[in-house]
Image (cartoon, grey):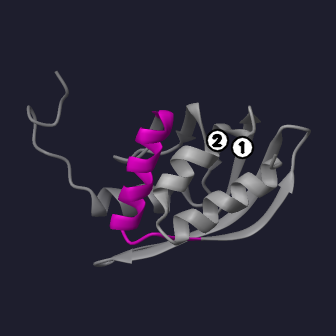
Amino acid sequence: MKNATELVAQMYECFNRNDMDTIKNEVFHPDLVWHLPGHHPLAGTMNGAEEVIAFFSQLVKSGIKVDLIKIDMFGDDGAIEVHRGYGTYGDAKLDAINCTYYKIKDDKIHNVQVFIGNQHGADAYFNAVYKLKPIPHRLAD
């Protein structure tokens, strides 16, 4: 049985070696909810491992790198970590220190809230990387 800090560290290790299967099957709870603030195409609430893995894939595609700086337990069933998110895509650049809270359930990551250190920079970066389709093709049915 892994504690919260071990699970989060494992997630980072797997992410950095692009091992999404291990994250999906060993780290993420089936009812995972991941909250990412912002006003850009990747922002919002993601439900389930599939959506979060798809988000992770888009981070990789956008050139974002993530370095874990510090992680610590927060209560009996949670962890808080600080990480650096940075990348370059064409003329767009991002370098921000962020904080994330992880809640654990059934020995897996269950609920996540990301706090962005440079929200305006993240919004500008992802809006530069991901162009929206023109209306009406942009809107879901």
Residue type, numbered disc 1: Tyr
Q: Is residue 124 visible?
A: no
Prevalent SS, magenta region: helix
Q: Is residue 133 above or below residue 119?
A: above
Q: Position of residue 1 (x, y in %)?
A: 82, 46
Splitting the image into 4 quarters, where does residue 50 fall? top left
Disc 2 versus disc 1: nearer the observer: 1
Q: Please tell me whether mark 1 sits on a helix, a strand or a loop.
A: strand
Q: Which mark is residue 102?
A: 1
Look at 67% across and 65% down and name the residue there.
83
Q: Is residue 3 above or below residue 117?
A: above
> Could you tell me which quadrant the C terminus lies in?
top left
Circle 1 Cα neighbour tier, 10 Å, few/some/many (<14 / 14–19 / ≥20): many
Q: Is residue 47 magenta?
A: yes
Which mark sits nearer the N-terminus, 2 or 1?
Answer: 1
Q: Is residue 71 left or right of residue 9?
A: right
Q: Which mark is residue 113?
A: 2
Q: Which mark is residue 51?
A: none
Look at 62% across and 63% down and name the residue there.
12
Q: Position of residue 110 (x, y in %)?
A: 65, 35
Pick whichever, 33 or 62, lies toward us.
33
Residue numbers of the magenta segment:
46-66
Look at 56% across and 38% down and name the residue there.
35
Look at 18% across and 30% down and name the residue there.
139
Pick whichever, 71 or 29, lies toward us.
29
Q: Position of residue 118 (x, y in %)?
A: 57, 60
Q: Please tell me whether mark 2 sits on a helix, a strand or a loop.
A: strand
